[in-house]
């Protein structure tokens, strides 16, 4: 029999195990509760920011996933302004160049199926390839390092497949293949042709069967989904002038012509794009090896792996030692943006049907709100006639009377009147292109005063000082820009170059 001392020791051990279990349970629930509180507060801040952005003129849909949990999926503004039909998460919007990552995924899927290799040269798929393009590989096209120009025609300009190929093959190269980077839409159109040649299916049908259907995406494509026309957003310019729907433009039957097919123009919803993101987080569509190529392909000798254009995605390392996987797309009417912090289970999806300056900064501002403590997002100034006229007035005062007079006028401006950042940047670069360095510096200086939280404003001022030859002032402003956005690779590079 055990003595009483032994029994006491056994009971103490049991009590100790129970106490540890209780402490672990309390720690788990405390940590979980703290995380939930953090997510709740962040969600409210982001919702407030988006509501204010809508008041300023934003129109579209936004989806936010925080740490693996979808917390926002809402519409803002109108898909049909005339009928006052509001945008919703089910509004169908042109995603522009986000199309490219579908093209890239389709190529990798075909490679998984043993039907091609990314090291194949295009001579395997096209006849009469000229010598200067005969060494192009699929890899080169995916990474925009072929040297091809950006376009050989307008998005909706009719052209036959053969005429498109002939025009592309006759075009001049910007550099020797593999030597540099230059964003090329027609390179991705060529990839779409390869997808069709290899699969024996139309581009859209192959993507549906191999990417979209397995992901549950039934509202994505050019025309295959047989869209409800009422849900397709009308595109508007900044003055609410009707541009129309993409499906009302000149199409080659059920899809755009080759100038656009494969590189842009896919229609989708924010919810469908989220399904795609979730699918990419698994191996249901692409294997682990294929996704490694998608995000981290072979790079050129002169590249920094911390920031590259991969296969249809821009991939950069954050200051948290994680990777941001991002791409956007626009035809200057519609705008789409998908920003994924896949190591941190955080995703931002934005789609817009109206030209509104500042829309392209929304996901960047939200990301700063999420990852930077106490960050206060910047809301755009209303892009109206009053602010445009005042911006022009400030530029004219700088050119005729100087910076100090412009500062005084800006300080005494009427309430609810301000300068437009994009306008001053445009005018500043016009002066810079004419080597009017002091005028450019003055315009950019006013821009920095008006937009003290804009990394782009200080980046531009740094560039103007650099062009003038004032390295000290240039470095100072690039450093401010870098403080405002630690992912500003241009500022990092300029500082390093000027300090050498």
Image: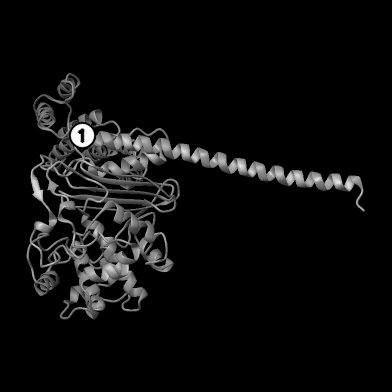
Q: Residue 73 versus residue 109: which sits nearer the camera?
A: 73
Q: Residue 444 versus residue 57: which sits nearer the camera?
A: 57
As displayed, is residue 263 above or below residue 134? above
As displayed, is residue 326 above or below residue 53? below
Q: How many marks?
A: 1
Give the residue at x 12% y 72%. Answer: 161
Q: Quadrant of residue 104?
A: bottom left
Q: Residue 14 versus residue 41: which sits nearer the camera?
A: 14
| Element type where label 1 sits in the image | helix
Q: Quadrant of residue 384?
A: top left
As displayed, is residue 175 above or below residue 390? below
As displayed, is residue 188 above or below residue 71? below
Q: Residue 416 versus residue 53: which sits nearer the camera?
A: 53
Which residue position is annotated with label 1?
Answer: 56
Q: Quadrant of residue 453?
A: top left
Residue 118 in view here: no
In the drawing, does residue 497 fall left or right of residue 428?
right
In the drawing, does residue 53 fall left or right of residue 152?
right
Figure colour scheme = one colour
Give the residue at x 35% y 63%. Answer: 294
Looking at the picture, how far across and down is residue 477, in whole percent? 30, 35
Looking at the picture, how far across and down is residue 394, in whole percent? 13, 28
Looking at the picture, how far across and down is residue 269, in whole percent? 25, 53
Give the residue at x 42% y 62%. Answer: 282
Give the residue at x 18% y 56%. Answer: 228
Residue 340 in view here: yes
């Amino acid at each position: 029999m055990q003595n009483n001392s032994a029994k006491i020791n056994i009971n103490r051990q049991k009590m100790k195990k129970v106490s540890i279990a209780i402490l672990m349970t309390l720690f788990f629930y405390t940590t979980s509760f703290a995380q939930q509180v953090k997510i709740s507060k962040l969600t409210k801040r982001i919702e407030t920011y988006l509501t204010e952005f809508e008041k300023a003129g934003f129109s579209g849909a936004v989806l936010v996933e925080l740490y693996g949990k979808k917390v926002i999926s809402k519409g803002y503004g109108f898909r049909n302004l005339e009928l006052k039909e509001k945008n919703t998460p089910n509004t169908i919007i042109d995603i522009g160049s986000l199309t490219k990552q579908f093209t890239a995924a389709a190529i990798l899927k075909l490679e998984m199926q043993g039907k091609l290799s990314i090291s194949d040269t295009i001579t395997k798929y096209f006849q009469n390839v000229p010598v200067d393009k005969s060494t192009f590989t699929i890899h080169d096209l995916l990474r925009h390092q072929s040297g091809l120009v950006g376009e050989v025609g307008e998005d909706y300009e009719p052209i036959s497949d053969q005429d498109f190929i002939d025009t592309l093959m006759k075009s001049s190269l910007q550099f020797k293949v593999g030597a540099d980077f230059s964003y090329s839409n027609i390179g991705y159109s060529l990839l779409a042709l390869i997808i069709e040649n290899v699969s024996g299916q139309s581009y859209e049908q192959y993507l549906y069967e191999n990417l979209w259907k397995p992901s549950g995406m039934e509202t994505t494509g050019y025309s295959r989904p047989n869209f409800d026309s009422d849900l397709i957003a009308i595109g508007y310019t900044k003055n609410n002038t009707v541009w129309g729907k993409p499906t009302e433009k000149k199409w080659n039957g059920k899809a755009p012509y080759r100038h656009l097919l494969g590189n842009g123009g896919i229609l989708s919803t924010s919810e469908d794009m989220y399904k795609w993101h979730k699918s990419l987080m698994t191996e249901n569509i692409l294997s682990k090896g294929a996704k490694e190529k998608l995000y981290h392909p072979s790079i050129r000798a002169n590249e920094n792996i911390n920031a590259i254009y991969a296969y249809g995605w821009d991939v950069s390392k954050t200051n948290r030692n994680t990777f941001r996987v991002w791409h956007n797309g626009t035809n200057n009417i519609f705008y789409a943006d998908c920003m994924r912090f896949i190591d941190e289970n955080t995703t931002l999806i934005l789609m817009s049907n109206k030209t509104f300056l500042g829309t392209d900064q929304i996901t960047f501002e939200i990301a700063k709100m999420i990852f930077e403590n106490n960050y206060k997002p910047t809301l755009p100034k209303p892009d109206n006639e009053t602010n445009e006229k005042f911006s022009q007035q400030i530029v004219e005062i700088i050119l005729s009377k100087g910076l100090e007079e412009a500062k005084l006028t800006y300080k005494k401006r009427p309430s609810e009147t301000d300068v437009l950042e994009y306008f001053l940047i445009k005018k500043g670069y016009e002066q810079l292109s004419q080597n009017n360095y002091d005028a450019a510096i003055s315009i950019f200086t006013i821009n920095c005063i008006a937009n003290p939280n804009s990394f782009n404003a200080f980046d531009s001022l740094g560039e103007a000082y650099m062009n003038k030859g004032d390295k000290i002032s240039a470095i100072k402003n690039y450093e401010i820009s870098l403080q405002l956005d630690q992912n500003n690779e241009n500022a990092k590079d300029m500082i390093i170059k000027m300090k050498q």
